[in-house]
Image (spheres, helix red, strand yellow):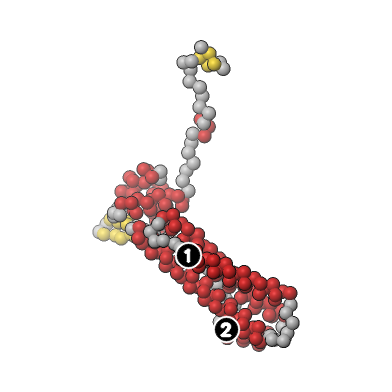
Amino acid sequence: MQLLGFTSTEQLPSVHAANSKKRGLSLEEKREKVLEIFHESKDVFQLKDIEKLAPKKGVISQSVKEVLQSLVDDDMVHQDKIGISNFFWAFPSEASVQQESVLAKLQKQAEQNKQQQSSLQQKFQTSMAGREDSADRVAKLSDVAKHEKELHDIQNQLDQYAENDRDKMKSMEEAAGIAQDAANRWQDNIEALHDWCKRRFDGMGEQLEGFFKENGYNENMETFA
């Protein structure tokens, strides 16, 4: 019997032949897979051990050394040399503690920036009492209110994260990025207010600089990367 030019004994060509080659893992995916080996076993390994286990996770042995070194550099895997051999280990609980430490630091910095911005805004309003608000200044103050709400929402989200939950750990990493952005926005807003004052009150540069410095402003403040 024939069907579309093929006999019943012939094998039809595979539709997916052109796509048979699987996409390789990204560096971040390889890092996650190698880290899983440590977290699942809770054991101590040498490089050669990881090179044997990694292919089971989809990571080729030739790339293990580079991936493992990147995890060591980021303090996600510990390394110690005993005699002539290097040993590596990492435990699940450490990842949770590390993330909480980063989040706590970002929260603290965001709160400090918020307090500094609030103090500057209040003192500036007092010093400029009786002067007519410009449209630019009104817009700046509106942005401040919006950022305050964003920061409040972020802090509410952070309170909901549970310890040692892998899915929520990823959410914590995303929240850390959001908190970092919020801290940078607060810093940008302080700088914008400083620049606006210099333009609005021409001739009062020295007084304005003194005012801002007294309240903790530093033109060399760095953003959070």
Q: Residue at x 33, y 51 (%)?
A: 40
Vertical order, 123 against 159 (above or below): below
Which numbered marker is on residue 22?
none
In percent of width and height, residue 76 lies at 39, 59
User: Disc 1 residue type?
Assistant: Leu
Q: How crowded is the residue under tag 1: few (<14 C-alpha within 10 Å), some, or many (20+)?
A: some
* Quadrant in which residue 218 is drawn: bottom right
Which comes sooner in the sequence, label 1 or label 2?
1
In percent of width and height, residue 83 lies at 25, 59
Distance between mark 1 and mark 2 Cα atoms: 29 Å
* Quadrant in which residue 149 is drawn: bottom right
Vertical order, 202 against 70 (above or below): below
In percent of width and height, residue 147 lies at 60, 69
Vertical order, 105 against 44 (above or below): below
* Quadrant in which residue 203 is drawn: bottom right
Q: Residue at x 38, y 64 (%)?
A: 97
Residue 182 appears in the rendering: no
Mark 2 — residue?
215
Mark 1 or mark 2: which is in front?
1
Q: Nearer the viewer, residue 24 or 111?
A: 111
User: Disc 2 residue type?
Assistant: Asn
Q: Residue at x 44, y 62 (%)?
A: 161
Which numbered marker is on residue 158?
1
Q: Nearer the viewer, residue 6 or 205?
A: 6
Residue 42 appears in the rendering: yes
**In what element is the residue under mark 2?**
loop
Residue occupying the far top of the picture: 1
**In what element is the residue under mark 1?**
helix
Q: How crowded is the residue under tag 2: few (<14 C-alpha within 10 Å), some, or many (20+)?
A: some
In this rendering, would 164 be left or right of 133?
A: left
Q: Residue at x 58, y 81 (%)?
A: 119
In percent of width and height, residue 20 lies at 49, 34
